[in-house]
Image: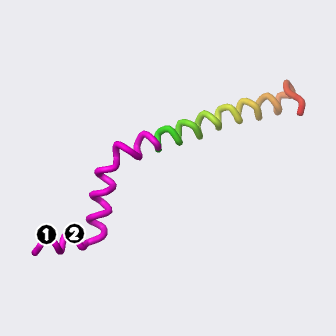
Amino acid sequence: MDLIALFKNKKFIIAIILILTIPIWLPILSYIFEFIIQAGRIMGTYIRLIGSGTICI
C-alpha cells in the first residue's frame, strides 16, 4: 500500500523520469550551450572588427 502512495506523489515520479532520461537530454543541452558559446564568439569577433574599423558595413 505504501508503494502505491509513493507513486501517487507527482514530485517523486518527475524525479525518477528526470534521472532516467539524463542520457537523452544531457548531450542535447551540451550541444545547445556549445552552439550558443560558438555563436557568441563569432559575433564578438565581428563586433571587434567593426569597432576597430577593419570592416565597414
Figure quadrant of the C terminus: top right
Q: CA distance from mark 1 to mark 2?
A: 6 Å
Look at label 2 and name its amino acid: Phe
Task: State left or right for residue 44 relative to residue 28.
Answer: right
Q: Label 2, on which residue?
A: 7
Residue 3: which disc? 1
> Residue 8 in magenta?
yes
What colouring method underlies this structural image?
rainbow
Task: State left or right for residue 26 relative to residue 8.
Answer: right
- CB atoms at circles 1 and 2 under 8 Å apart? yes
> Which residue is depicted at the point 46% across and 42% down?
28
Q: Which residues are magenta?
A: 1-28
> Quadrant location of residue 40?
top right
> Which residue is depicted at the point 65% across and 33% down?
41
Above or below 54: residue 17: below
Figure quadrant of the N terminus: bottom left
Look at label 1 and name its amino acid: Leu
- How many residues crowd mark 1 within 10 Å: few (<14), some (14–19), many (20+)? few
Above or below 50: residue 3: below
Residue reaching furthest to the right: 56
Which sits in the foreground, 42 or 10? 10
- How many residues crowd mark 2 within 10 Å: few (<14), some (14–19), many (20+)? few
Residue reaching furthest to the left: 1
Task: State left or right for residue 42 relative to residue 14.
Answer: right
Q: Position of residue 32 (x, y in %)?
A: 53, 42
